[in-house]
Amino acid sequence: MKLRTAEPEEPDVNLTSLIDVVLLLLVFFMVTTSFVRESQIAIRLPEADTSAAPASAPPVEISVSAGGDYRVNGRALVDNRPATLAAAIRQVTDELEEVPSVTISADAEASHQSVVTAMDIAGRLGFSEISIATVRAPGDSAGDGS
């Protein structure tokens, strides 16, 4: 009995299906990729100016408390609704001939939403100069170089 050894066959690798799968994956990732553009806000930082300020209307000062209550030029409002804040700002500015600037100062514990609401209402009323007041914390040694 004569046994013959089988000749080894060379494996045949078909790359067509592999290329199809890779191209489908490439198309899938290209379609599902999101190209997000972050919105940007232009911020103009204040600069120290030693020259005298021109005579203009005094700024409207809006204070935001920790509880979200508003004060316009030191006067407390009846409630903290946006309509009440808008009416109070209109009442202060109706007496003035030119549109003054707005300064917003908020308590450190005030919510961002309360401050943004004040900024939004001031912008809707036509104020283009909105300043945010900051207060240096007691014991802050930011300017002494140590």
Image (cartoon, rainbow, N blue to C red):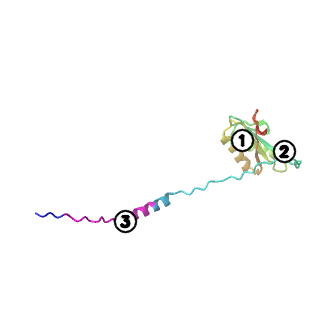
The residue drawn where x is 72% and y is 41% is 84
Mark pair 1, 2: CA separation: 21 Å
| Marking on residue 84 | 1
Specify the segment rendered in magenta: 5-25
Q: Across the whole image, how many numbered discs are drawn on residues?
A: 3
Mark pair 2, 3: CA separation: 78 Å
Q: Tell me where residue 76 appears, x and y as whole percent.
A: 76, 35
Q: Earlier in the sequence, mark 3 or mark 1?
A: 3
From the viewer's perspective, is 63 left or right of 4?
right
Q: Earlier in the sequence, mark 2 or mark 3?
A: 3
User: On the image, numbered disc 2 is attached to which residue?
Assistant: 58
140 up-or-down from 92: above or below: above
Secondary structure, mark 3, is loop
Tell me, yes or no, whether the highlighted magenta stretch contains residue 16: yes
Amino acid type for the residue under numbered disc 2: Pro
From the viewer's perspective, is 58 left or right of 66?
right
